[in-house]
Amino acid sequence: MDDDDLIAAAREALEAAHVPYSEYRVGAALRTADGTVYTGCNIENANYSNSLHAEEVALAEAVKNGHREFDRIAVSSGVRDGVTPCGMCRQTLAEFAADDLVVACDEGGDAVTEYTLGELLPNTISEGTLDDASRE
């Protein structure tokens, strides 16, 4: 699946979002190292802290199906505002993806802004961070 198709998959996924409170739809399409794509949408809950984010839903489905290596994620919102994964989603992605994971953010039309996960979340907490802390 090429980059345009990944953005299209994120846009399609956001149509299934459950957003009765914010009305802010988000879709994500996560590509594994072998090219398999998993999508997710945000699912809100009246207790906002229990809401699921699109990136989390896509990642959970991929991990559930045995994938642990990823090379790209596309994120889109209903208003095509270049939304990036939130801090929580960045940390969750960092558990399974390297700093060079490409994060493609949909700006609408053909416009896409790309970042790496390392740019969006420098100095992440990792298994190594926890190992180092336990040695002190």
Image: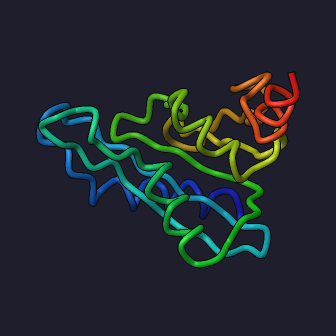
Please tell me in which quadrant of the rendered image residue 65 appears: bottom right
Nearest to the observer: residue 82 or residue 36: 36
Up/down of 64 relative to 108, above or below: below
Q: Position of residue 136 (x, y in %)?
A: 86, 21
Residue in the picture at 69% in, 57% down: 3
Q: Position of residue 27 (x, y in %)?
A: 42, 50
- Above or below: residue 88 compared with residue 98: above
Which one is in front, 61 or 13? 61
The residue located at (50%, 29%) in the rendering is: 86
Visual colour scheme: rainbow
Closest to the observer, 72 or 68 = 68
Residue drawn at 75 percent across, 44 percent down: 102
Image spot of residue 122 (x, y percent): 77, 23
Residue 5 spot, x, y in % from top left: 60, 64
Q: In this rendering, would 89 be left or right of 136?
A: left
User: Is residue 70 shown left or right of residue 58?
Assistant: right
Q: Quadrant of residue 103?
A: top right
